[in-house]
């Protein structure tokens, strides 16, 4: 494995309110450079808000977030975000969309990143003719072309069918192994969290309810190895008082 390019991230007593509504309360979290962490938790518990604050799109009400030991000051060009929707520019070709991730880069770099995500033959296509999975590959390429130090993944595979999702998980793992950015994945899929992450964090009641290291060798694909972690994580999520009944929202 290559040495990490990713930046370390720390959250020090981070709280967030929207008006009178507390979302996060004194959250402390340290991510080592190059670590891949997944965040799970019931809908509305503040996962995306946490990600948006790390992205510099939202400010904490109190507390400090640092990236590479620097307090966050707006959007950081070394931090890229992938959302559930690919958010491509429909009037630009696939190659131009990728290039827009780092406009000063050589075209050859954009082409090689497109090849890496398996879309070398689509560079002249318009986004409108691509499948959902292909669009997310372009969005991933657009993020990777900037060689990010931190990649924030806000349910980027949530809208994809199961097989495409598995392919994308393998792709994300491969590019992470190659580039060793620091990754944070928000997902509702416990399977996906255990499959991809070094560490899985369960959020509940405005704080971190569980922080578990996945002590498996990669790839974490063996069902029997994953089971212990999936049970642990799911029981933590479902034992929260607001979720005493079975939840369709979570899958293993
Ligand atoms: N800009 C905002 N103004 C007011 N309330 C907000 C804002 N953004 C988020 N919220 C609220 O904060 C809470 C946390 O939202 P957030 O999107 O972080 O949750 P989440 O855990 O990512 O949910 P999901 O899994 O459904 O995406 C929700 O109740 C949401 O309605």
Image: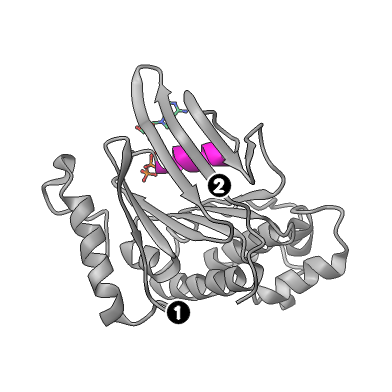
The residue wearing badge 2 is: 9
Q: Give the CA distance from mark 2 to mark 1.
A: 24 Å
| Corner quadrant of residue 204 | top left
Tell me the quadrant of ligand 1: top left
Q: Nearer the viewer, residue 171 or 10?
A: 10
The residue wearing badge 1 is: 219
Residue found at x 42% / y 76%? 163
Q: Looking at the picture, how far across and down is residue 140, in whole percent?
A: 62, 62
Residue that sits furthest to the left in the current view: 245
Residue found at x 27% / y 57%? 250
| 158 relative to 152 in the view: left or right | left
Residue 3 versus residue 236 in the image, above or below: below
Is the distance from the Cβ of mark 2 to the nearest ligand 1 atom less than 8 Å?
A: no
Mark 2 or mark 1: name the one nearer the start of the chain: 2
Question: Secondary structure under badge 1?
Answer: loop
Q: Which residues are magenta?
A: 47-55
Q: Looking at the picture, how far across and down is residue 9, in whole percent?
A: 55, 47
- Work out whether residue 1 can be spotted: yes
Question: Secondary structure under badge 2?
Answer: strand
> So how many labels did they put on this image?
2
Confirm or deny contact between disc 2 and disc 1 (CB under 8 A). Answer: no
- Magenta stretch: helix, strand or loop mostly: helix
Q: Nearer the viewer, residue 154 or 12?
A: 12
Q: Looking at the picture, how far across and down is residue 20, in whole percent?
A: 35, 17
Image quarter (top left, top right, bottom left or bottom right) of the C terminus: bottom left
- 21 in the magenta segment: no
Residue that sits furthest to the top in the current view: 20
- Work out whether residue 122 can be spotted: no
């Amino acid at each position: 494995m290559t040495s990490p390019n990713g930046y370390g991230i720390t959250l020090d007593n981070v709280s967030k309110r929207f008006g009178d509504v507390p979302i996060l309360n004194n959250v402390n979290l340290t991510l080592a450079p190059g670590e891949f962490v997944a965040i799970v938790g019931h809908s509305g518990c503040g996962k995306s808000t946490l990600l948006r604050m790390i992205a510099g799109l939202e400010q904490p009400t109190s507390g400090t977030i640092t990236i590479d030991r620097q307090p966050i000051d707006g959007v950081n060009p070394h931090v890229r975000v992938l959302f559930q929707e690919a958010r491509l520019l429909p009037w630009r070709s696939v190659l131009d969309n990728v290039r827009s991730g780092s406009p000063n880069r050589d075209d050859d770099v954009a082409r090689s990143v497109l090849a890496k995500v398996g879309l070398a033959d689509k560079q002249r296509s318009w986004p409108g003719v691509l499948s959902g999975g292909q669009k997310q590959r372009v969005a991933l390429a657009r993020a990777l072309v900037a060689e990010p130090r931190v990649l924030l993944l806000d349910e980027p595979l949530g809208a994809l069918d199961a097989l495409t999702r598995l392919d994308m998980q393998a792709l994300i793992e491969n590019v992470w192994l190659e580039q060793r950015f620091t990754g944070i994945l928000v997902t509702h899929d416990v399977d996906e969290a255990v499959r991809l992450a070094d560490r899985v964090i369960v959020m509940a009641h405005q704080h971190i309810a569980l922080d578990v290291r996945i002590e498996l060798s990669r790839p974490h694909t063996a069902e029997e190895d994953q089971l212990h972690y999936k049970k642990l994580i799911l029981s933590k999520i479902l034992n929260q008082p607001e979720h005493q009944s079975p939840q369709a929202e979570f899958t293993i």
